[in-house]
Image (cartoon, rainbow, N blue to C red):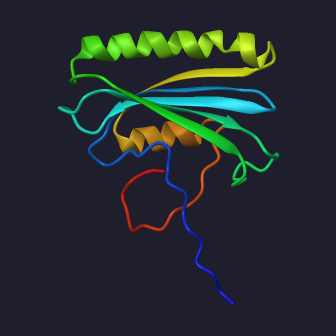
């Protein structure tokens, strides 16, 4: 019997008009933190979406992994607000070594482009685990 599986809601929804500024990752064998600074269009407010993931197993797609997702949205698209959000999250990621341990992988990657640039940058990262999603949507998950 064939059963249709429900796709999990993506943490980061980057569409064709989006501009992605920066990607962060920090992780060890028990958990990781991943963040993305972006906006939906040139005039949209800056948004930082980040999540903490606590591993249930070594399977990167384990549905039993616990994920806590948070979002911070700037009041507008002003680059000064982007700079403030960037500085705060950069300090969080760099400071995460105190919690994750000295062997933690810490990555801070400038993207500076649209969804196509983001996809290329993401696929080059050794921490990225990507699934193919049906072409019903142009959103990168």
- Viewer can see residue 126: no
Q: Residue furthest toward the left?
A: 43
Q: Nearer the viewer, residue 135 or 94?
A: 94
33 versus 96 height, above or below: below
Q: Is residue 9 left or right of residue 117?
A: right
Q: Nearer the viewer, residue 24 or 64?
A: 64
Position in image of residue 116 (x %, y %): 39, 45
Position in image of residue 96 (x %, y %): 66, 15
Residue at 58%, 31% in the rendered image: 34
Q: Is residue 118 left or right of residue 95?
A: left
Residue at 62%, 22% in the rendered image: 107
Position in image of residue 7 (x %, y %): 54, 63
Please count the marks in the image. Answer: 0
Q: Is residue 68 left or right of residue 31?
A: left
Q: Quadrant of the N terminus?
A: bottom right
Residue at 32%, 17% in the rendered image: 82
73 versus 78 height, above or below: below
Q: Is residue 25 left or right of residue 98?
A: left
- Viewer can see residue 41: yes
Position in image of residue 57 (x %, y %): 82, 47
């Amino acid at each position: 019997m064939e059963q249709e599986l429900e796709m999990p809601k993506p943490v980061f929804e980057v569409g064709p008009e989006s501009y992605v500024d920066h990607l962060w990752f920090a992780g060890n064998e028990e958990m990781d933190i991943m963040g993305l600074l972006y906006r939906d269009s040139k005039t949209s407010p800056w948004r930082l979406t980040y999540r903490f993931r606590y591993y249930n197993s070594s399977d990167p797609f384990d549905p039993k992994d616990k994920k806590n997702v948070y979002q911070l949205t700037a009041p507008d698209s002003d680059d000064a607000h982007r700079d403030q959000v960037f500085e705060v999250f950069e300090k969080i990621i760099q400071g995460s070594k105190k919690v994750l341990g000295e062997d933690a992988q810490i990555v801070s990657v400038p993207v500076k482009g649209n969804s196509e640039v983001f996809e290329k940058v993401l696929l080059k990262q050794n921490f990225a685990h990507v699934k193919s999603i049906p072409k019903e949507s142009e959103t990168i998950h």
